[in-house]
Amino acid sequence: MGQITLQGVRKSFGPVNIIKDANLDIEDGSFVVFVGPSGCGKTTLLRLIAGLEDVTGGQILIDGKNVVDVPPAKRGLSMVFQSYALYPHMSVRGNIAFGLKMAGLPRPDIDRKVEAAAATLNLTPYLDRKPRELSGGQRQRVAIGRAIVREPKAFLFDEPLSNLDAALRVQMRLEVTKLQKQLATTAIYVTHDQVEAMTMADKIVVLNAGHIEQYGSPLELYERPANLFVAGFIGSPKMNFVSGEAAGEPGVATLGVRPEHLRIGKEGEGWPGTVSVAEHLGSDTFLYVDAGKLGMLTARCIGEFNLKAGDRVWLSPDPARLHRFDKDGAVIRT
Amino acid sequence: MRRCRSAATTLHHALNSIIIAGGSTLIAMIIAIPAAWSMAFAPTKRTKDVLLWMLSTKMMPSVGVLVPIYLIFRDFGLLDTRAGLVLILCLGNLPIVIWMLFTYFKEIPKDILEAARMDGATIGRELVYVLTPMAVPGLASTLLLNFILAWNEAFWTLNLSTLDAAPLTTFIASYSSPEGLFWAKLSAASTLAIAPIIILGWFTQRQLVRGLTFGAVK
């Protein structure tokens, strides 16, 4: 079991409030990603759950039990650090076995579990090497092995892939997701990379300045962002924001439309503009269009379009896919 | 007969050197480890000031305090005693030892200690299984450097000892006397004095280099 509930969790460092009243319900076995810009408090929130930081207020429940006064070792969670944090003087075997050794398991059990974890992560040939003799990806795998071998209630990942190169990151992303599904253990994953968040998560928590902006499935966040921040943060390229006044929708402070929901229409249809940059990716074409008083718009068109800078285009937004926000940035539901 | 006497004298001074260098190193380490430890892992607002103050004591030329120290030693009956030399060398090297250890301890990444805590290690076990093994190279190189510094120290030993407590440095200096400079004996005694250090350095060079370049797994 690994159900984690946050109730009014607050954290301040001196006068600075890092986490302001976080409420969250993480279901057993789900993969939850904390995402947000740097300094939004996502790592702090993870460390609060881990017990590496003390909460200023509120409760953290693991399987219904308040753990705010329980030391990290006793919470039954395991963590994968951004820096891997392997014990440099121990072999891979020693690193993976350390937690079990601390738990006082008998030697044969430890050996069996370590071998099994190593086999899952393709680390068997490296068991007797020291961390410094491994590549970045292998070290990351050892760190994950150290986490899974203890069969924790939940895994906590603190930006585990950010030190890897792009290709390896994609591969490890798949491996981590597969592993989590296979083990069916609750996982909380911190990242600033929204692609990681969208692809790995069952549910995403979008954090901004210590505040939970929205909690929901990736597609929910994409299709129904609760506010301007989430709308702008999720999705790449970013959602276009235009003033409602200019777009002919009085009463709407900001109108949002995703680049993929802008269609190139016939002349005289929709918003006129001039292409300032066209990026041809083969599968898609990204058009950066100067639309006069509407500002700069990005359009993503499927396939190849024979357009170049300076061409005049007419963009029509998909009316069913418009996002309307009031002057406080909250979405207007109709 | 004279040769025997000479050998016995040399041995006496060598023994003094070992006791003084070894003793001062040992005491300095015993004081410095907890000091550096607490400053690295539980720093307070004043930690930086304390460290700077310690270093500042090394900025004053020793000769500037020679007279007061000499008088204190005379009053306490510490002149020409091993205990006196152990004390002064220990105090003299303490700032450097603390600084070195502080930087080594500082380099141990906090993440690793946190990982150990997440792995279920208590403070005691964290100390035994994670911190100490990681700190050993740093401790070893500090120990060695401190020993070399104490072994080679000549200013205080020359000024505060004559015969009974005189280590090899004082003994070697005695060959340069008003009666003349005894080049052969001086060279022989010097070789003898540096031999143990060379041997020690030779055997610990791996440890020493590792200590100086020790870094965590990035």
Image (cartoon, coloured by chain):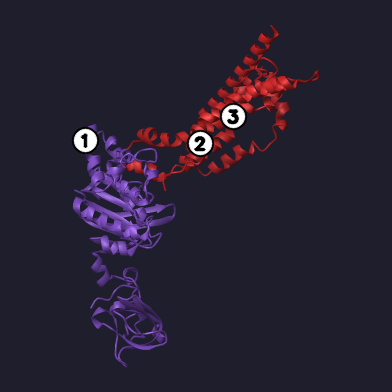
Against B47, residue A256 (above or below) is below
Host chain of mark 1? A
Which residue matches tag 3? B148
Q: Which residue is rendered at x = 33% and y = 71% of the image?
A: A236
Against A308, residue B53 (above or below) is above
The residues tagged by marks 3 and 1 sit, at their Cα atoms, a distance apart of 48 Å
Which residue matches tag 1? A109
**Which chain is painted in purple?**
A
Q: Which residue is rendered at x = 55% and y = 26% of the image?
A: B199
The residues tagged by marks 1 and 2 sit, at their Cα atoms, a distance apart of 39 Å
Closer to us: A172 or A264: A172
Closer to us: A228 or A200: A200
- Disc number for residue B36: 2
Disc 3 marks a residue whose amino acid type is Ile
Closer to us: A318 or A146: A146
The picture's colour for chain B is: red
Secondary structure at numbered mark 2: helix
